[in-house]
Amino acid sequence: MSTETETTTETNTESPVGEGAGGCIDDDELITAWGLLHEALTTLGPLLLRGIDPCGHDMSGPWFEVLLRLQRSPQHRLPMSRLAREVSLSSGGFTKLADRLERNGYLARQSCPSDRRVTYAVLTPEGLELAEQARRRHVELLRLHVLQPLGKGALRDLADHARTLRDHARERTT
């Protein structure tokens, strides 16, 4: 595949991207595709957290992500530094979030016996119950707002593409 490009208008050009799976694509088409993906995620985010706490209130994205990741982890615990990285928060931002979760009785901090530098975030029984209830409601909302409009095949394709993008970005940021 050649990386030569042709200008079609002043703002509507094709830029070389090399021999990757994308080949050459019109700049406006690329910007529009990324913009649509970003807009969809930004619009869907709040819908997927609507009313997911047991009182029927919305839950913040980072709060839910922490609960969900801990709920799905062995022994319902993860190193706090890893958890902060996985939910894309600074260490200070994550500490504040962990403090709130701990104050509400949903999270406990646990020292690692073999490495004093590591502190685990661990779900309490109350945190596990909250995570399970929120997860059930979240799955209902995912089925309604993601699976229903896309269908199973497109959802699986989307997950594959998202994994590819995530892995590509991680390779370049570590």
Image: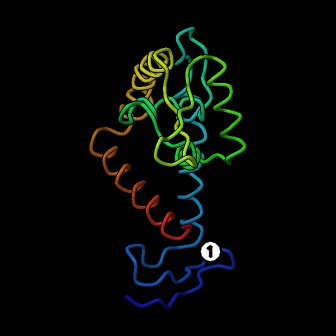
Q: Is 154 left or right of 101, judged from the image as shown?
A: left
Q: Residue at x 62, y 74 (%)?
A: 12
Residue 53, x across and y down, in percent: 54, 16
Query: Is the C terminus in the top left, top right, bottom left or bottom right quadrant?
Result: bottom right
Question: How many circles with numbers are drawn on the protein?
Answer: 1
Q: Residue at x 57, y 8 (%)?
A: 55
Q: Nearer the viewer, residue 27 or 19?
A: 19
Q: Is residue 100 above or below residue 91?
A: above
Residue 35, x across and y down, in percent: 60, 55
Kind of residue at disc 1: Asn
What is the residue that sits farthest to the left in this orientation? 153
What is the residue that sits farthest to the top in this orientation? 55
Q: Is residue 161 above or below residue 54?
A: below
Q: Is residue 9 above or below residue 109?
A: below
Q: Nearer the viewer, residue 138 or 130?
A: 130
Residue 50, x across and y down, in percent: 56, 21
Q: Is 128 left or right of 11, judged from the image as shown?
A: left
Residue 18, x across and y down, in percent: 46, 84
Callout 1 secondary element: loop
Q: Residue at x 63, y 32 (%)?
A: 98
Query: Is the N terminus in the top left, top right, bottom left or bottom right quadrant?
Result: bottom left
The residue that disc 1 covers is 12
Q: Residue at x 72, y 44 (%)?
A: 92
